[in-house]
Amino acid sequence: MTNIGIVLGSTRPGRIGQAVAQWVYDFAAKRTDAAFQLVDIADYGLPLLDEPVPPSMGQYSKEHTQRWAARIAEFDGYVFVTPEYNHGPSAALKNALDYLYAEWNNKAAGFVGYGSAGGTRAVEQLRLIAAELQMATVRSQVALSLFTDFENFSAFKPAAHHEQPLTTMLDQLVAWSQAMKMMREQHHMETYRS
């Protein structure tokens, strides 16, 4: 079974992203082509990157990094649920991405953004970061507006029209995750035979 992590990219007290991530999970969990799990970066207590060796070396020395790496390694693809702060993703999400390297490689990523401009600028930055981490990002994304999808800018009430782009994004993400999983398995077998 293909495993997809829905990564909640905000740790701010009172965050509205929790409701968004739950909405994505509840919608995705009805599918039969993949297994979906919520991953809340707040649960990992990651300080600002404190590993002495670059993540690309894979020599994680801190317990929090090892826990985070083990969790992320479980998945074949990811949906990043991201707020937009000052035209970019949250520092907490960027930090969580920066902690690891190999665990992200050759996997697929999709995005659900929220903010005054639908989180689109945060997603654009995340696409660049994902590329450097060797993730393939799918084209379709969900853009939720603070003005129309949140009552009083806080209570999440998504418009029904968001279900179609969410479906399309998940379709693309599952297909790419499955293809990249086969690619990773083939590479592993070739490496093992060498």
Image: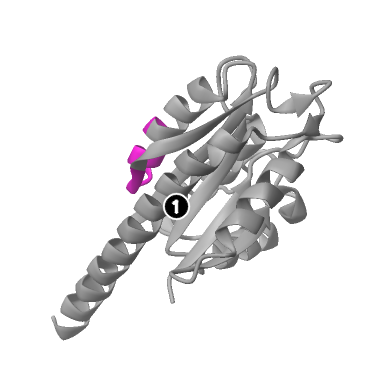
User: On the rendered structure, is 172 left or right of 35?
Assistant: left
- Residue 187 on image: x %, y %: 21, 71
| Residue 65 pos. (x, y %) | 62, 57
- For residue 183, which quarter of the picture? bottom left
- Residue 10 appears left or right of 142: right
In which quadrant will I find the N terminus? Answer: bottom left
Q: Quadrant of the C terminus?
A: bottom left
66 relative to 88, above or below: below
Given the image, on which type of amino acid does mark 1 rest? Leu
Above or below residue 69? Residue 163 is above
Query: Which one is in front, 191 or 28?
Result: 28
Q: Describe residue 192's horizontal placement relative to residue 50 as left or right.
A: left
Query: Which residue is labeled 1 in the image?
Result: 170
Residue at image point 28% right, 68% down:
184
Q: Which residues are magenta?
A: 128-137
Query: Does 165 lie within the magenta span?
Result: no
Looking at this view, is 93 or 16 the one in front?
Answer: 16
